[in-house]
Every structure is written in structure tokens, then in C-alpha cells.
Image (cartoon, grey):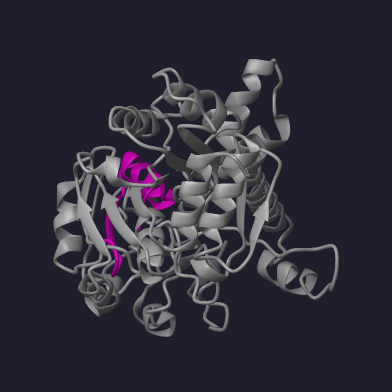
Amino acid sequence: MKNPNFNLLRNRILNKEARISIVGLGYVGLPYAMEFARNGFRVTGIDSNEKKVEALRSGESYIMDIGHEELREINGSGAISYTSSYDGIDDADVIDICVPTPLGKSRDPDLFFITSAVRSIKAKIRKPKLLVLTSTTYPGTTREYVAATVSDSGFVIDRDFFVAFSPERIDPANRIYKLANIPKVVGGVTELSGDLAILLFRQIVKDVIRVSSSDTAEMVKLLENTFRSINIGLVNEMAIICNKLGIDVWEVIDAAKTKPYGYVPFYPGPGIGGHCIPIDPVYLTWRMKVFNYRARFIELATDINNEMPYYVVNRLAEILNNDVKSIKDSRIFIVGVAYKKDVNDSRESSAITVIEEILRRGGRVLYNDPYIAAINENGLHIKSTKLSRKALASSDCTLILTDHAVYSYEWIVRHSRRVFDTKNATKNIKSGKIVRL
């Protein structure tokens, strides 16, 4: 192939001579940086948070899936370095952007971190590079913004630079599926860009699936998480329906999942959280406004999921009422505030909304989470309380919002006056104290 820059990058990737920069060292970027380093590449991790950079240099991991010893072993190999500066990024042959893509205050996509990264990268480009966007976003972002912004500086795609999108599929706390054994979807803005990105990720991932374009790859990610959001919305509504009918929704789900085809089990809860499920479908519904189309199915599931924290508090009020109490002046002990079991991440956690609503109604809140030392969000400033017999016994209700595996639920039930379990963590415990979602 008579494309010297393509061939140069191709050979450097194949020979593991390519220098790789990972922008954003969070739950996605850090595992990617470590996996490339583990597979023989020289890697520079870039993050604007100087505290994170210093922690990584010291061998202190802030991600539960990455142990301190694992991090220190990679650091000791000399294959990876960390910085908060873009100054050395021109030495990189490959730049993978793994920055957050949150929602703004008006719940519109906030691409600030992507635009900031691309501007910083563009200013440093001096030689051919492969740019990969990993951050979840709406279809068209890689082509219309990343590629177009770099092109505006006079660089020519497929000659001076190559661009692709490849969504992350990292599932925190999953002990079976890790980065290396989860198939990787890749779509290039151009065919040559796709060729290089495919070659790159084959160095660290067993199965790489190519799609026809970066737009398609972006849509794959949104479909995956919208599928989950809609099915969670469905089963959350089923929980509400079953409660009204006096039926145990957990028993219904357990029976339904015995069907060997045509059914995938999802489970209800106090709402959705994390950096994907509450956010990604909104990127798609927002994008559809450009085409004057309303994604009604997605909006409905989002509405149901967003209402679940308030439904939980209403159920809590009913439980207390049956004990001749009200939320006002009652003491509620919350077990678990992370958005997901066995993670140290409270981003978009429904527990925050539950706490806010209990406080708004005049209740008093204590919480324990072994992975979340303090909540400092939306004006809330609460520290985790020790899980003790006294704390449970002196509370009017224990509310289980996150089912961390480290908890002894039998012990929690034994020492609580009343337990409202929104996660079915007490499934195998028989007690008149327990009320389940």
C-alpha cells in the first residue's frame, strides 16, 4: 500500500514500537493504559487531576478492579508513566481519548472534556497519529467533531492523521469479563483509519469486531446501554405492578428466567446510576431532536427509572406508617450508596436522590458504605457511619440500596427494627422485619 504514514504507524503498532497516550485515567482509561503497557507498549497516561496522577505515580490505585500491587508491578516495568500535561503528546503515535461525557444541568450532552482534549491534542500534532475516541457520545461526534477539528488545522485525514471510534465495555466489579476477553467494536472515520484501529486493539483484545463507520460504532454503544435502560425500566414498572397486586416480583423474575429462550433477566431497584445507563440513552434522544424525532420508548424508560427513588421513598413512608410512624423525624439507616454492587463509585447513584428526598420530608439519615467514605454532591455533605448494632437498633428503618457482598445481611436484619430491601439482598432470610421492593 503506497501510503507511507499508514505503513509507518502500522509497522510501529505491529512491532510494539508505537508510543501510546491515554487521555483520561478513570474507570476506562486506566485499565486500557495498563493493558497496553502489559502487552509491550510504551504508554503515557494523561489526566487533568493532579491528585490522581500523584496517586498513580505512588502506586496507589483508586479503582477497585485494579489492585495496588498490580499497579506497582506495571509501574516497575517502566512501560508506563503519568502526567497532567499534554506537553509530550507529540511523541505519541496513538492517542486514545477516554474522558467523561456527562450531562449538563439541563440534561443535554456535555462534551466539554472531549472538546478540551481534542483542542489540546490538535495544538501538539507534529507527526502522523492515530486518534481513537473511546468516550461514549452521540453518533457523528468522531466524524463531525474530532476528525473535522483536526482537519481544520490543515491536516489531511488518511495522510497526516487517522481517526476511529471504539466504545468501552468495561463492567466494574465483574470478575469474569475483563478488558482482554470482552470483544471490542471498532469503526473508522475512513477505511484506513479502521484498519489501523483494528490492528491496534488486536494487540490487547482477543476478539475485535469491525463495523462500517465510526457513527455505527457510536450507535452500538448507545444501543447496548439503551437496551439495559429500557429493560430496567420495564422491570421497575413490573415491581410497582406486582406490589399493587400483592405479588413478589423477585419470585416472578426467578421463575421467568428458567425459560431457555426469548427472555433475559433484569432486576428492579431504587433507580439507575453510574456513568453509562442514566446518561447514554439521553445522548441518543438529544441527537434525535436534530431530526425532529421523539424517541418515545427511550424517554418512557428514562422517566420510570428516574421516578424509582421517589417510589422507594413513598414505599418507605408506607412501611413507617404501618409502624405508626412518619418519615418526618424518623431515623433511616441506609446500607450502601454506591451506584452498583462492589464498586467505589457513587456517580449518578439513585441513593443520592433517595437521601435528598428523605431529608426533604423531614427524616434523618445515616448511611454506611465501605467503599464510599463521604457523599459530597448536590449540596449533601454526609460521612459514612460505622455499621453497628447500636446504629441499626436505634434507627426506625434500615434501607438497603446497594447490595455489597461484604455485608452480612443476616446480621443486619437481626439488629434492625425494620428492613426495607430494594435489592433482594435478604432473599434467603425469613423474617417478619423485612419488606422487599
Residue 195's place in the image compared with 38, above or below, is above
Q: Residue at x 69, y 51 (%)?
A: 231
Judge left or right: residue 277 versus residue 301. Answer: left
Tell me which corner region of the image, top left, top right, bottom left or bottom right, holds residue 400.
bottom left
- Could you tell me residue 240's position as x and y percent? 66, 52
Question: For the N terminus, which image quadrant?
Answer: top right
Would you say residue 222 is visible in this rendering?
A: no
Tell me which corner region of the image, top left, top right, bottom left or bottom right, holds residue 158.
top right
Residues drawn in magenta: 345-372
- Residue 69 vs residue 211, the one in the foreground: 211
The mark tally for this picture is 0
Residue 369 inside the magenta-drawn segment: yes
Q: Residue at x 52, y 53 (%)?
A: 315
Residue 282 inside the magenta-drawn segment: no
Question: For the C terminus, which image quadrant?
Answer: bottom right
Q: Residue at x 67, y 39 (%)?
A: 216
Residue 40's place in the image compared with 432, above or below, is above
Tell me which corner region of the image, top left, top right, bottom left or bottom right, holds residue 374.
bottom left
- Could you tell me residue 394's position as x and y percent? 26, 69
- Could you tell me residue 124's position as x and y percent? 28, 32
Residue 110's place in the image compared with 432, above or below, is above
- Could you tell me residue 85's position as x and y percent? 19, 41
